[in-house]
Image (spheres, coloured by chain):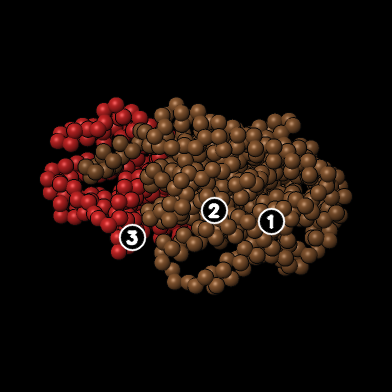
Chain colours: A brown, B red
């Protein structure tokens, strides 16, 4: 029986959603397991002063308006800090300090994995009384960290390892963020979502500038990004392009300009550093991986002289080049326009292909990118919800995931870099408070009387 | 030990759905998306209902009729939502078919349609179990358990897990029945589903009587088994029809 269309739709959406889910799940587990006996936050019991609460230290005895104002101020300062640092990084990138930026990212990854990861591991070891001596622990930690640092910006490491480390970074930073006081966390989340919206979409926003710079130079962004490349080859199965599907037949009428744009206008990057708190949040979202498209195009050209290029706007597919729907002419135009970019990538492509093996290279060369910051702040929201109740965790999880889905749909409609935080965070916050205020008395009232429906 | 008990309760409620999810759903990303969206829909229905009922809560726990009204309204609202879900699904099916044509692939098979319905039902069922059972389980991981007065034979968590399992079964399979009923225009199936849901909800009212859960839970399981049998028969019939 021929494989049905159901097998192939939504692969790339799930490819983004599953790491986000794993990240959130682990953060919730960490929050749960460590908050019961509290070795983790006991250390932080005198409220820690960090970049996120520079202005105001929340104490439970403060009045509501005091907390509210303080939280707003904290969030404002934090966002301004992030904006300044991002502009600084954009400036560095503008003056071609890519090497510095990359090393800086490596250093911050080292720091996050080593210190924040280390402290989480240590409190885990304490909490579960794992018998391990300090030397072994140190060697393990050191190896873990070094492999993580090496996996950034290097093509010699399997993509799976890199994805794993991205998720790990997200988990550590998010678990750390959950130590912030409650009001500050909420204000911070909302402020960051708004900042994200401005920075990516507004003209002159730092991330927009950065993305456009990177596109004009045709470089990979020197930033921490989760790439949802399908790591498992599904040869022989024509993968559907669910993003196209979701916009209905509309994508058929897309013009060539749109398609070219989609490959040139898809990256978004956001890098932030909070140096004084001893950790780094690097937040980028590159939706659509233009370098991947080029790589595939290059390969296609070598295979079939550019004729079988599929519409480059579409999402990942192992055999897309055999499923071109009509418009061959435009494909060639698209391909010609990008040929210089393709050449620039050639040496790296060769390496990649050798590594991946011949069949898999097309499969593993294209995917949606999601910034690490989105991982972090989704997980912060869920982790914060986990401190209240499990019910809010489920509600927030569903809200965030559906917000992510909405963002992906919008992505397929607009075909440009989009901020992933605003919709998800808005839905998450709304659902959190709805659940907490409305649903809990309802559910608890009926369920404790053993009434269900 | 208490952690084991908590996990045990969770698995009791969600174990069958978990194995269904792993063996059938997780292989097809589209079905995962269906499960997620259907779970979200159910959550939203709960929030709307909770918002409506918020003014009247908490209900006095010595009279049973407010609970009857609550269950009646909730079930009818959710059944209305099922029709909405069907309408959305119908449009989605058209889109999928059009998409399949564009890729020169076969259109949706009958089994595919049933799988989508199953995923939708599973989403509803999982949402039920998650919100009515799992989310109350937090204390079960601690060093104690909890008994309610009216059903003192078993711990509350165990009872709610057992009830949740029955409801997961009912929700999962009634979605398959309902979708097939709508597709074929089969009136019996169309009315069977709301009836089962309502009766199952009303049966839980038996738990209100002291010691009522001894009667209520077997009745509930009767409804669950009835639903799954009916679903199985219906699926067999339709599959053999298409094969001929």
Earlier residue among tags 2 and 1: 1
Q: Is residue A32 visible?
A: no
Q: Which residue is mark 2?
A: A171
Instruction: Establish if B54 lies above or below A453.
Output: above
Other-residue count near label 1 (Cα within 10 Å), few / some / many at <14 / 14–19 / ≥20 = some
Quadrant of the image for the N terminus of chain A?
bottom right
Residue nearer the viewer, B206 or A197 = A197
**Does residue A106 lie above or below B196 as drawn?**
below
Residue B68 x/y as whole percent: 21, 35
Q: Going by the image, does B123 lie left or right of A421?
A: left
Are the residues under marks 3 and 1 on the same chain? no
Mark 1 — on which chain does it sit?
Answer: A
Give the alpha-carbon distance from disc 2 to disc 3, as whole Å: 23 Å
Q: Are marks 2 and 3 in contact (CB under 8 Å)?
A: no
User: Residue A354: x percent and y percent?
Assistant: 76, 68
Q: CA distance from mark 2 to mark 1?
A: 18 Å
Image quarter (top left, top right, bottom left or bottom right) of the C terminus of chain A? top left
Q: Secondary structure at mark 3?
A: helix
Front tag of 3 and 1: 1
Is disc 3 on the same chain as disc 2? no
* Residue ID at (19%, 50%): B147
Q: Which chain letter goes with mark 3?
A: B
Q: Is residue A452 visible?
A: yes
Q: Residue at x 74, y 55 (%)?
A: A103
Counting from the top left corner in percent of width and height, residue A255 is at: 76, 37
Q: Are marks 2 and 1 on the same chain?
A: yes
Residue for badge 1: A107
Q: Which residue is mark 3?
A: B3
Neighbor class of circle 2 (other Cα within 10 Å; few <14, some 14-19, many 20+) is many
């Amino acid at each position: 029986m021929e494989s049905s269309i159901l097998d192939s739709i939504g692969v790339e959406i799930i490819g983004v959603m599953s790491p986000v889910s794993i990240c959130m799940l682990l953060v919730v587990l960490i929050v749960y397991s460590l908050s019961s006996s509290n070795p983790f936050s006991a250390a932080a019991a005198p409220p820690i002063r960090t970049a996120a609460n520079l202005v105001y230290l929340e104490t439970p005895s403060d009045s509501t308006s005091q907390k509210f104002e303080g939280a707003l101020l904290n969030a404002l300062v934090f966002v301004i800090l992030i904006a300044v640092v991002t502009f600084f990084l954009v400036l560095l990138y503008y003056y071609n300090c890519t090497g510095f930026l990359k090393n800086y990212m490596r250093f911050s990854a080292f720091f996050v994995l080593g210190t924040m990861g280390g402290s989480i591991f240590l409190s885990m070891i304490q909490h579960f009384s794992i018998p391990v001596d300090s030397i072994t622990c140190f060697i393990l930690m050191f190896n873990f960290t070094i492999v993580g640092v090496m996996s950034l910006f290097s093509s010699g490491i399997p993509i799976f390892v890199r994805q794993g480390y991205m998720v790990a970074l997200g988990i550590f930073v998010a678990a750390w963020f959950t130590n912030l006081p409650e009001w500050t966390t909420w204000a911070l989340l909302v402020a960051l979502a708004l900042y994200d919206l401005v920075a990516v979409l507004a003209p002159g926003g730092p991330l927009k500038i950065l993305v456009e710079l990177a596109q004009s130079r045709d470089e990979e962004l020197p930033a921490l990004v989760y790439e949802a490349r399908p790591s498992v080859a599904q040869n022989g199965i024509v993968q559907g392009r669910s993003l196209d599907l979701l916009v209905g037949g509309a994508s058929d009428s897309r013009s060539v300009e749109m398609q070219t744009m989609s490959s040139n206008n898809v990256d978004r990057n956001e890098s932030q550093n909070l140096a004084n708190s001893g950790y780094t949040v690097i937040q980028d979202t590159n939706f659509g991986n233009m370098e991947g498209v080029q790589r595939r195009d290059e390969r296609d050209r070598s295979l079939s002289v550019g004729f079988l290029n599929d519409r480059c706007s579409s999402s990942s597919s192992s055999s897309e080049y055999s499923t071109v729907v009509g418009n061959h002419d435009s494909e060639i135009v698209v391909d010609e326009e990008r040929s210089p970019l393709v050449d620039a990538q050639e040496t790296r492509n060769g390496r990649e292909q050798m590594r991946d093996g011949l069949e898999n290279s097309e499969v593993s060369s294209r995917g949606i990118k999601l910034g690490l910051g989105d991982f972090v702040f989704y997980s912060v929201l869920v982790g914060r919800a986990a401190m209240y109740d499990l019910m809010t965790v489920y509600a927030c999880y569903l809200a965030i995931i559906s917000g992510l889905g909405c963002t992906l749909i919008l992505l397929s409609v607009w075909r440009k870099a989009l901020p992933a935080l605003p919709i998800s965070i808005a839905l998450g916050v709304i659902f959190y408070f709805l659940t907490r205020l409305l649903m809990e008395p309802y559910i608890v009232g009926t369920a404790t009387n053993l009434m269900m429906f | 030990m208490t952690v084991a008990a908590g996990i045990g309760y969770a698995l009791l409620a969600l174990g069958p759905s978990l194995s269904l999810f792993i063996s059938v759903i997780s292989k097809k990303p589209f079905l995962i998306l269906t499960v997620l969206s259907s779970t979200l829909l159910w959550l939203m229905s709960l929030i709307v209902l909770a918002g409506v009922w918020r003014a009247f809560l908490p209900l006095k726990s010595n009279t049973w009729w407010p609970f009857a009204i609550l269950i009646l309204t909730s079930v009818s609202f959710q059944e209305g939502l099922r029709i909405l879900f069907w309408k959305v699904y119908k449009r989605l099916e058209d889109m999928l078919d059009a998409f399949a044509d564009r890729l020169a692939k076969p259109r949706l098979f009958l089994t595919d349609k049933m799988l989508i319905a199953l995923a939708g039902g599973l989403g509803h069922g999982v949402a039920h179990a998650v919100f009515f059972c799992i989310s109350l389980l937090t204390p079960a991981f601690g060093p104690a358990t909890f008994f309610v007065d009216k059903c003192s034979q078993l711990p509350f968590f165990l009872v709610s897990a057992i009830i949740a399992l029955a409801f997961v079964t009912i929700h999962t399979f009634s979605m398959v029945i309902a979708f097939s009923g709508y597709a074929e225009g089969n009136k019996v199936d169309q009315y069977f589903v709301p009836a089962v849901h309502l009766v199952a909800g009303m049966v839980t009212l038996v738990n209100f009587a002291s010691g009522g859960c001894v009667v209520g839970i077997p009745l509930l399981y009767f409804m669950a088994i009835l639903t799954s049998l009916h679903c199985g028969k219906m699926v067999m019939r339709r599959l053999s029809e298409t094969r001929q």
